[in-house]
């Protein structure tokens, strides 16, 4: 009887969450809408086509591009109108340029603005032709901003940047679900941001976001951006100034350029302190957000704002301007030709106007959003930028920029870029005197061993684990493990074979790739990190995909994860083993794999041993409960399949690292 009462209650909860989601979606509150869509789905709600499209749009407007691309791809055959354009833009932003070009062509048929779409197509073509990397290192710093960045600025002996408080409450967030930011200061040591940070000034703490700063050259005046809630409940970005009195910051003044009707943000000061640059979406611009300048006069008054013109501003957004000591304008844009999201550009000031816009190329830029590039005042080769290129491409991270050290190789015949036309300088030859000949000793002539050519393609075959038959029509995707850019994609043929070409820029010793192999709901998605030197072995052995069985019991088994710490299975893990034992006792024809995984810490080879030993320990426990040894296959995968962004070189706390130490139970096949 209780079940009869429970069913209508559950259905009511589903409809309630879905109704909330629809309301938030209608109001443009996509974060809350997505929360309620997901809650409704967890309660068992089945979405119709239109609702699934709304979920995809939520991911897009929240800038969760990977999830947007994944969701739009699932709906590809049913997309029309503006959704085709959004799908094309997401394809561009994940680096799938060929596919994006096809989708942009379709978007024109669906009614998209042909002038703008043609520019987007040219941008994809430009990206395909400019895939090489400059000799520059762009690596994440240890500065924690907890979700997003509003850029960073040098200040005296350190840097000032926006950050949220660690563990900020879930209620203290903006419409994107991000915690509100305040200004913090960290010292610099040898160009590196130190982990200790302090609030920049208690007088500059506000209820909503604060960030995107600019200091005058004497550090006595600061311009900053604040989110201000105006009449009607709308949030507007405004620029304020504040002065330093020798002890603290005070006399906060709102700039006259602000309005309740549009945003003004991202201030930047010219080296001579005479011009303020800023971003605004005021009427009369060229696109979404444009760059403007306004004269700063001696009596702390301002001239009239001027749009920087069509050479700088586009149909898209131009944001985060910075003017360097040598009077170069750096800014980010998604309207100029680039790799997908916001790219960083440089412009020259010629004959009274900014022009000659140049993409800074990779690795300054990626397929993600790259912005807020600043140059070290004491070393023009160093600097910082912000980007969401790392991990799941949701969180912004501050990266440091350094020149890459290039080792001199004596026998290298290939010319170094930029040095092709230099002529050798002959040293003067001094008259020789007969040398004193030492006793002859045996010498061993240096043997130069040629480096084997690295593969220019990733090729292999896909097989079904249950019957060893070929898997046709599966997607094989290679991604850059740092930027998340799609390097190449192919679909398996009728015989299971596939071939993914590798761009020259990625044909490097020890180059790693994120590999994702999937085929809808027929097979379990396989994700792994592969090294280019493993390509030959993978080609010989093939890739095995595990089918998704319809049996609910088998699905339950394949959702089991057994956690461990060190080499000891936790109490939670032992409880999972107990449940697995009961399932396998009732289903003696099932063969499972016990896949051992570690986190990405310590020695790689030790991790292989550890994950194998713990997987075998799990097998021994199950054998002690009466499960036959031929029903289990313990396997070691070490740190190859991480469940979060904690790969080597990425800072994570211990608890997050431990999420990767686990035994995953995978239904492998049924016994005949």
Image (spheres, grey):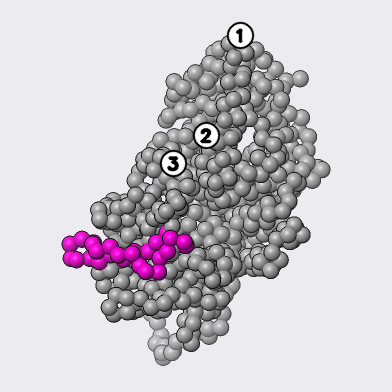
Quadrant where the N terminus is found in the figure: top right
The residue lying furthest to the left in this view is: 247
Left or right: where does residue 550 sit relative to residue 196? right
Relative image position of residue 201 (x, y in whole percent): 25, 56
Please tell me which residue is depicted at 71% across the width and 44% down the height of the picture.
75
Answer whether labels 1 and 2 touch (C-beta < 8 Å): no
Which residue corresponds to mark 2? Answer: 597
Q: x%, y% of residue 177?
A: 47, 45
Q: Is residue 666 above or below residue 329?
A: above
Q: Is residue 501 visible?
A: no
Q: Position of residue 296 (x, y in %)?
A: 34, 77
For the residues carrying marks 1 and 2, which lies nearer the camera in this image? 1
User: Decide: marks 3, 1 in contact (CB < 8 A)?
Assistant: no
Residue under pointer 1: 1
Q: Residue shown at 65%/38% (left/top)?
A: 525
Residue, far right: 494
Q: Residue at x 63, y 30 (%)?
A: 45
**In terms of secondary structure, where does tag 3 sit?**
loop
Location of mark 3 (residue):
601
């Amino acid at each position: 009887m209780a079940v009869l009462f429970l069913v209508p209650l559950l259905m009511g909860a589903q409809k309630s969450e879905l109704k909330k989601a629809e309301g938030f979606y209608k109001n443009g509150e996509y974060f809350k809408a997505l929360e309620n869509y997901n809650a409704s789905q967890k309660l068992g709600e089945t979405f119709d086509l239109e609702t699934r499209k709304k979920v995809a749009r939520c991911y897009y407007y929240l800038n969760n591009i990977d999830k947007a691309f994944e969701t739009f791809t699932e709906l590809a055959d049913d997309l029309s109108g503006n959704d085709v354009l959004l799908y094309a833009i997401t394809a561009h932003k994940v680096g799938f340029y060929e596919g994006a070009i096809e989708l942009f062509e379709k978007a024109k048929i669906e009614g998209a603005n042909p002038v703008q779409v043609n520019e987007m197509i040219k941008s994809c073509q430009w990206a395909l032709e400019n895939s090489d990397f400059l000799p520059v290192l762009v690596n994440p710093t240890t500065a924690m901003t907890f979700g997003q960045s509003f850029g960073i600025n040098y200040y005296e002996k350190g840097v000032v940047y926006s950050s949220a408080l660690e563990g900020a409450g879930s209620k203290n967030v903006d419409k994107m679900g991000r915690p509100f930011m305040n200004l913090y200061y960290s010292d610099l040591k040898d160009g590196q941001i130190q982990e200790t940070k302090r609030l920049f000034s208690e007088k500059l703490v506000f209820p909503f976001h604060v960030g995107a700063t600019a200091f005058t050259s004497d550090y006595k005046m600061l311009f900053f951006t604040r989110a201000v809630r105006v009449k009607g409940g709308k949030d507007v970005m405004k620029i304020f100034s504040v002065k330093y009195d020798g002890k603290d910051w005070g006399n906060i003044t709102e700039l006259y350029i602000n309005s309740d009707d549009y945003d003004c943000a991202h201030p930047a000061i010219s080296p001579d302190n005479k011009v303020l640059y800023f971003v605004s979406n005021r009427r009369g611009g060229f696109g979404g957000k444009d760059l403007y300048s306004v004269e700063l006069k001696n009596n702390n008054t301002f001239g009239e704002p001027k749009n920087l013109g069509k050479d700088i501003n586009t149909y898209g957004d131009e944001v985060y301007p910075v003017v360097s000591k040598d009077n170069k304008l750096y800014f980010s844009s998604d309207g100029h030709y680039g790799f997908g999201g916001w790219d960083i550009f440089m412009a020259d000031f010629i004959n009274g106007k900014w022009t000659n816009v140049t993409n800074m190329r990779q690795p300054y830029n990626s397929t993600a959003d790259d912005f807020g590039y600043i140059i070290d005042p004491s070393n023009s080769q160093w600097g910082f930028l912000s980007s969401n290129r790392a991990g799941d491409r949701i969180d912004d991270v501050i990266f440091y920029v350094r020149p890459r050290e290039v080792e001199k190789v004596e026998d290298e015949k290939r010319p170094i870029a930029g040095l092709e036309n230099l002529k050798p300088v002959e040293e003067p030859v001094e008259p020789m005197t007969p040398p004193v000949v030492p006793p002859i000793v045996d010498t061993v002539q240096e043997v130069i061993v040629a480096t084997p050519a690295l593969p220019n393609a990733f090729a292999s075959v896909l097989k079904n684990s249950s019957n060893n038959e070929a898997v046709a029509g599966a997607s094989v995707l290679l991604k850059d493990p740092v930027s998340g850019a799609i390097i190449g994609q192919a679909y398996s043929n009728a015989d299971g074979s596939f071939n993914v070409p590798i761009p020259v820029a990625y044909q490097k010793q020890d180059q790693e790739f994120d590999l994702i192999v999937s085929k809808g709901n027929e097979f379990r998605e396989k994700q792994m990190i592969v090294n280019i030197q493993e390509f030959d072995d993978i080609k010989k052995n093939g890739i095995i995909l595990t089918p998704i069985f319809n049996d609910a019991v088998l699905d339950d088994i394949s959702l089991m994860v057994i956690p461990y710490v060190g080499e000891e299975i936790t109490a939670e893990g032992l409880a999972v083993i107990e449940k697995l034992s009961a399932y396998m006792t009732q289903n003696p024809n099932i063969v499972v794999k016990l896949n051992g995984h570690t986190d990405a810490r310590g020695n790689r080879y030790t991790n292989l041993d550890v994950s194998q030993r713990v997987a075998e320990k799990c097998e021994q426990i199950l054998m002690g409960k009466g499960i036959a040894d031929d029903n289990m296959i313990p396997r070691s995968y070490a740190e190859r399949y991480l469940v979060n962004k904690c790969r080597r070189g990425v800072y994570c706390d211990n608890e997050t690292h431990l999420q990767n130490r686990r035994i995953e139970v995978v239904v492998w096949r049924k016994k005949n």
